[in-house]
Amino acid sequence: MNFYSLNRKAPQVSFKEAVIAGIAPDKGLYFPESIIPLSSTFFKNIEGLSNQEIAFRAIHQFVKEDLSDQTIKEILSDMLDFDFPVVQIQENISTLELFHGPTMAFKDVGARFMANCLGHFSKGKNEEVTVLVATSGDTGGAVANGFLGVKGVNVVILYPSGKVSEIQEKQLTTLGRNITAMEVDGTFDDCQNMVKTAFIDQEITSKKKLTSANSINVARWLPQLFYFLFAYKQAKSKGKEIVFSIPSGNFGNVCAGIVAQRLGMPVKHFIAATNINDTVPNFMISGEYIPKPSSATISNAMDVGDPSNFVRIRQLYDNNFKKLSQNLSSYSFSDDETRSAMQHIYHTSSYVSDPHGAVGYLGLKKFLEKHPNTYGIFLETAHPVKFLDVVQDTLEISLEIPKQIKKVIEKQKISHKISSYEELKSYLLNS
Ligand SMILES: *Cc1c(COP(=O)(O)O)cnc(C)c1O
């Protein structure tokens, strides 16, 4: 299968080329030239399949020219070694817990898949690849963990100083080896702009092979469609139409969900729930896409004012607003509403949700008001311990710190403090 640039001014490329390049030469996001539905028997018999088998069937068409069946299976068994449980919290409302991986955030799966692919593609080559990534929180930890020790790949992570949680910061600054953390005096948008500038800076790109590990990279983005299939496998027996509510920032996860639907998975509707960074909710009202600077919230992994993957979602509907609105709703919620939702979930269901999951819950509730006869699943994208202060203050409880997090907290932070693009550039040119 080939991938084309959504800006349509660059040649089509293979999966391998798309993964290595990250973004097309015309700055467009890569997109698969087709999505061929899986057989109806696959969905009929999905309960009898293991997660690895489901993932293999789902990803095969996109990668088969560049990865042998054996390699795909090895990669999948390496990365899918934890659970993705659907946990019922109220009648007709469940949460899909995506935080059982090594860094306790949903980005572990995409990061590991991409790390494995890139490691595989750079085997036997002398040229090293540098993965350059900006993070508003969780991406950094998952990418650092996924790429740690991968031969031929160096990782440079930019994060906004003081704007990620302590645990998140430790997860990306304590690993060492091929992982370097850049602590930027600025916002997430500043980090992202530095990364974008580096990608088009020929002084750098003539010397170094750069790629991105944000969800613009097809190897980070596409495997996220597995979650929805794993959830469907568990929820199918309810016999009701299913809707998914996805707490959204860069809109990669919800976009992957829609791809799962295109593969033939029965879903009635998607809800993309956001914090006050409401560019997409506004678009769904007005039809006009007006990006804006991001605002800081308690669900900081979703503080994105110009979500990169939204162009992919629009493409899935041929840029037809009406068709898109029939399958996707998007709502925005304030921090106060998010805190109230966390309290409500805790007091009615004894379930501790993190701020991102709570935004997903709010989106689902809003949709269900008008569509009561459906089975709703909201995605819990991070373990509550990753947002320890907010969760403990809001719920007035104290959380037990899991082992893998304790280990990280005790380690020493090592970061390079930078405040301008020039400092990043000089690091990249001289390292
Ligand atoms: C990245 C992230 C999100 C947003 O996912 P997108 O695919 O960028 O929309 C939501 N919650 C958490 C915890 C995240 O880390």
Image: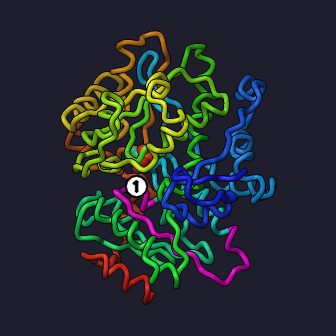
Q: Name the residue under label 1.
A: 138
Q: Is residue 83 placed above or below 138 in the rendered structure? A: above
Judged left or right of residue 381, residue 315 is right
Residue visible at 31% across and 22% down in the picture: 348
Looking at the image, which residue sits at the far bottom?
A: 430
Dividing the picture into quadrants, the one containing residue 217 is bottom right
Q: Where is residue 78 in the image (x, y as percent from the top left)?
A: 66, 56
Say which of 312 and 235 sits in front: 312
Q: Position of residue 8 (x, y in %)?
A: 56, 53
Dividing the picture into quadrants, the one containing residue 149 is bottom right
Judged left or right of residue 380, residue 136 is left
Judged left or right of residue 302, residue 102 is right
Q: Which colour scheme is used?
A: rainbow
Say which of 284 and 376 sits in front: 284
Disc 1 marks which amino acid?
A: Asp
> Within 8 Å: ligand 1 and the Cβ of disc 1?
yes
Q: Position of residue 213 (x, y in %)?
A: 50, 61
In the rendered picture of this protein, how many numbered marks are placed on residues? 1
